[in-house]
Amino acid sequence: MNGIAIDSDYLRELSKELLVEIRSLESKIHGMAGEEFNVNSPQQLSRILFEKMGLPVIRKTKTGASTDAAVLEELEKAHGSEIAALINRYRHLMKLSGTYVEALPLLVHPETGRIHTSFSQVVAATGRLSSSDPNLQNIPVRTEVGTRIRKAFRPEPRDWVFVGADYSQIELRILAHVTRSPVLTKAFSEGGDIHTETASLIFGVPQERVDSAMRNRAKGINFGILYGMGAFGLANRLDISQAEAKKFIESYFERLPEVKAFIDSTIAQAHKDGHVKTLLDRRRDLPEINSSNANLRAFAERTAVNTPIQGTAADLIKVAMIRLDAEMRTRKLRSRLLLQIHDELVCESPPDEVEQMSACLKRVMESALELSVPLIANVRTGADWSQLK
DNA sequence: GTCGTCACG
DNA sequence: ACGTACGTGACGACA
């Protein structure tokens, strides 16, 4: 209903710049391939890389040899393929140009001058919202060009300010709550860095001795736990051997036995009930949890572990949104809630309401549910969306 | 319409 | 022996 304003002129300028680089990359790629072809066609690209240039096939898809970003990276690193790096950059720019820079200005509503996404409450099986036409929950953020796209989103009127708030480590805090793990609880209560803490624990070194590689591995495990990973998945994600990954996982469960117990009991309960529930009793049926097909069954078991966590986070932020709306009405604020991005809320406020909205967001989000660990919401303000990070 | 790919949490 | 981390939506190619 509210919609969010974008600077279309700025995006059109950005578009021109990106197209110049895309054309230049394209002709370099054609030059190295020795012929013109459609770089956007995985089929044609695959013929060039694996047949004409004789590069090794790294992984297969249903229909042929994979050319995804990880494959191209490997071709570059391990086989010295210069064309691979250019293709990855080309793909990146095409993606951002086609999906965002070109598309968004066409979606500005003629009467409101804003972009109006649709949020659905009934698509995602975990209880998350989903956003479409356009999806404003997947606006780029991880790269330099991504940041420049976020700059196009501006408060309107122009002297207003974006106020954004995101939950810190919401899913791991929920894991701490549902497992009652003393180790996780202590880490979150003392306010340290959870991945460093985890690394210290599973590698048996003091936190000051945890380097970035160790922290990264611990981070991989922490996320993997939430997704029901196995050793193979973790090994791939962290680019380590399966045996090594297995050791990390064993070490993790040895130090955090309550997490292991939660996973096992959740799966057992799912087999009994045919469904799992979130903290606020949202239910997800798992019709394939007792399937005789091992793949389907394993998938359902991972889902059984993930859904109570992801779904509780979804419940939690919905409670916060309802209370925020109530507060805004009570206080007769002119500020508007614009976006929800799973663990984050983005609002726009007139200058004289920024302080009040910031405090309100923080308080409402942090008190949405009383868990056994504190909830932390970090609030930021900015003159465009890129400044909220 | 399906596939491969890739953007986000 | 096998496939292999959860949840989404959108794009271009191709049939």
Image (cartoon, coloured by chain):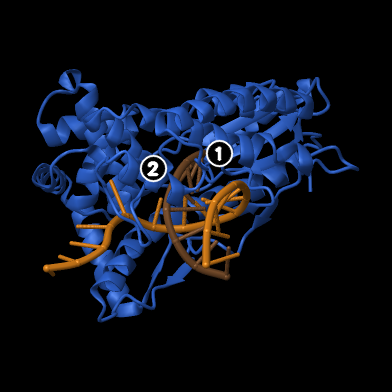
Chain colours: A blue, B brown, C orange
Extreme residue toward the bottom, this view: A292
Whether the residues at callouts 2 and 1 have beta carbons within 8 Å, the answer is no
- Rendered view: A80 above or below A296: above
Number of residues whose C-alpha sits closer than 10 Å to that of mark 2, classed few (under 14), some (14–19) or many (20 or more): some
Residue A90: image x %, image y %? 50, 32
Of A126 and A257, nearer the camera is A126
Q: Nearer the viewer, mark 2 or mark 1?
A: 2
Tell me the element at label 2. helix
Q: Residue at x 65, y 50 (%)?
A: A322
Which chain is disc 1 placed on? A
- Rendered view: A384 above or below A60: above
Which chain is disc 2 placed on? A
Q: Residue at x 78, y 25 (%)?
A: A9
Q: Quadrant of the C terminus of chain A?
A: top right
Horizontal side of A206 relative to C14 (left or right) equals: left
Q: Residue at x 34, y 78 (%)?
A: A273
Horizontal side of A157 relative to A370 (left or right) equals: right
Q: Amino acid at mark 2?
A: Ile
Q: Amino acid at mark 1?
A: Lys
Residue at the spot of label 2: A48
Extreme residue toward the front, this view: A34
- Asked if labels 2 and 1 share a chain, the reply is yes
Q: Is residue A104 visible?
A: yes
Residue at the spot of label 1: A95
Tell me the element at label 1. helix
Q: Between disc 2 and disc 1, whose residue precedes?
A: 2
Q: Residue at x 24, y 50 (%)?
A: A233
Extreme residue toward the right, this view: A111
Instruction: Count how many numbered circles sit on residues in the image.
Output: 2
